[in-house]
Amino acid sequence: MTASYTTASAVPGIIADPATLDPHAVRCLWMRPVLDKDSKAAFLPSVVFKDGTDCPLACEMNDLHARQFCQRLSAIYDWPVKDGRVLEASSEVAADRAYASLDEGDRMEKDGQGWVNVPGMGRMAAILAHDAGLPFGVAIECVTGKLALLFAKMEEQTAMQPHVVKKNLRAATEAACAKLTELYADEQRGPGASELSPERLGVIVADYHHAKGSTDEIFQRGLTAALEAGTEAWTEQKSSPAEIEQKTGAVLDAGIRHWFRLTGRKVVGD
């Protein structure tokens, strides 16, 4: 009987045979951007499963051949094709990956939908913050703030009693903090975005990603996540839209300049 794989970790080889994939478990085909052996731009036709994992379907090839390869499979299996780097920054895929990372006790499938219990909500928020590239302290403040806002809205919009909301918020927050401590096991907790100047926030993000050996793209993703955390903190501090715009510019300028210095590139004005 032919195997019917539903996740990349189940595929035994480096490259998956499309015929061995469960068609209902496939989210899309992905023209993943890579570099070939000559360090030139190329694409790696890949499958992305609904749990957020991905696996190559062929060796790297040029844009035209990769597109033809994916379109041919798309015509056979009716799978959509995603180009370039769009998928890497997809919040939907990030959420799927975080969901797939949860323990079985935190999640369940019902009527084709994924459900998460209260502690699982906290742990999933922690995974998303970590995967977004936030430094430890910024991640803790961001996650706990988001959970507090979420449960406050739940109290407003549902018939849930305040004491139940408080109990669930505590459970989710404790689970989130425990998961963050696990994910950032070898790191010291630093300040949150609300405790930092915009310039310092940008520098801390650059330092964090330089220590991690991050690529430019991963650093940029982390800086974007830090800006979102900063905007939430500044909004809570009653900063005006004009002030938030100014602080955003300061984070970007300080973060990118420091990143360039750390990675040995010339910075105008130095």
Image: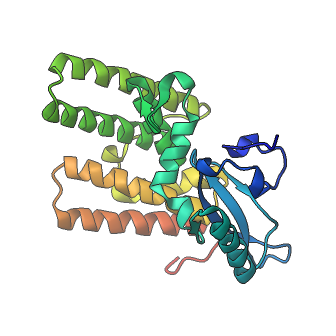
Q: Is residue 235 visible from the viewing direction of this image?
A: yes
Answer left or right for 195 relative to 221: left
Q: Is residue 132 visible from the viewing direction of this image?
A: no
Q: Nearer the viewer, residue 150 or 242?
A: 150
Image point (60%, 71%), residue name: 84
Image point (80%, 64%), residue name: 58
Q: Quadrant of residue 116?
A: top left
Image point (52%, 41%), residue name: 98
Q: Nearer the viewer, residue 42 or 146?
A: 42
Q: How many marks?
A: 0
Q: Nearer the viewer, residue 132 or 44?
A: 44
Answer left or right for 52 relative to 135: right
From the top left corner, tell me how far across and down residue 242 is, in percent.
Answer: 19, 68
From the top left corner, tell me how far across and down residue 114 is, in percent.
Answer: 46, 36
Image point (62%, 33%), residue name: 186
In the rendered view of the protein, which quadrant contains the N terminus? top right
Residue 9 against residue 234 in the figure, above or below: above
Give the colour scheme of this rendering. rainbow
Answer left or right for 220 relative to 142: right
Residue most extreme to the front: 1
From the top left corner, tell me how far across and down residue 267 is, in percent.
Answer: 55, 76
Residue 5 against residue 267 in the figure, above or below: above
